[in-house]
Amino acid sequence: MMTVSQFPKNGEDLSSSRIRFMDAKSLCFYKTEGGELRLDVENDRCVLSVTTVRAFPLNDPNHYISIIDANGDEVGMLYDLRQLDHESRHEVEEDLRRRYFTPKIEKIVSIRVEFSNVYCEVETDKGPKEFVVHGVRSNVVEISPGRYLIQDVDANRFEIPDLSQLDTRSRLLLERLV
C-alpha cells in the first residue's frame, strides 16, 4: 500500500510513474441533463460518465483524485483538485461530497451490545442517527490520536474528529467499546 509521501508531487518527473497524471488545465467536468458527471479532456476525448475517488481521503483530501470511467477503469489522476477551473472544481467537489458523506458524531446517546453487534444512537452534525456496527475491532478505527472513524453494517461512515471534545459520558461509552 502506498503512502502519500510515496506518490509523485506536482512538477516531479512523472514519466516513470504507472499513474497517468492529468493536467488540470485541460480538464472540464460538468453535469449532463441526466445528472451524470462528464469529463472533456482538451484535444483528446470526452468521457461520458465518470466518478471521482480520493486516493488518500483522510490524510490528503485535495490531492490525488482518481478519475474513473463507467467501466471502473481509471482515466487518470488529478494531482491537485484546487488547480481545476471554478466550475469543474465545484462539480468534482460535489461528486466527492456525496461519495465521502461522513457525519461527525457530537454526542453518543447510547451504545448497546448484543452478541457481536453494537447498536449505537448518536447525535451528529447532520442530526440524530442510529446504526449498527458489526466487528468493532475492524470497524471502529482510531485513525490518529483521538480521531475515530466508525463504519456501520451498511458501509456508512461516521467520524469522531476529536474524542476530547465529546462530553464525559460519550467518551466513557466509546472507551468501554474500544
Image: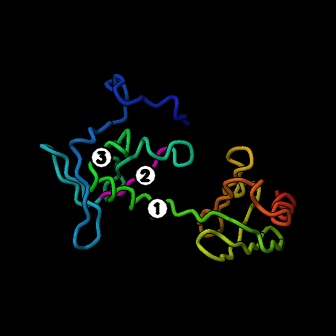
The residue lying toward the viewer, choosing from 50 and 10, is 10
Residue shown at the point (37%, 28%) measured from the top left: 17
Position of residue 104 in the picture relative to residue 137 (left or right) = left
Q: CA distance from mark 2 to mark 1?
A: 8 Å
Residue shown at the point (72%, 66%) measured from the top left: 134
Q: The C terminus lies in which quarter of the figure?
A: bottom right
Callout 3, which amino acid? Leu
Residue that label 3 marks: 84
Residue that label 1 marks: 99
Residue that label 2 marks: 53
**Pointers 2 and 1 in contact (C-beta within 8 Å):** yes
Q: Which residues are magenta?
A: 50-55
Q: CA distance from mark 3 to mark 2?
A: 15 Å
User: Which mark sits nearer the N-terminus, 3 or 1?
Assistant: 3
The residue lying toward the viewer, choosing from 145 and 100, is 145
Q: The N terminus lies in which quarter of the figure?
A: top right
Name the magenta segment's main secondary structure: strand
Residue shown at the point (83%, 71%) measured from the top left: 113
Counting from the top left corner in percent of width and height, residue 172 is at 86, 61
The crowding category of the residue bearing disc 3, from other C-alpha atoms within 10 Å (few below 14, some 14 to 19, many at least 20), is some
Residue shown at the point (31%, 24%) measured from the top left: 15
Q: CA distance from mark 3 to mark 1?
A: 19 Å
Counting from the top left corner in percent of width and height, residue 27 is at 23, 47
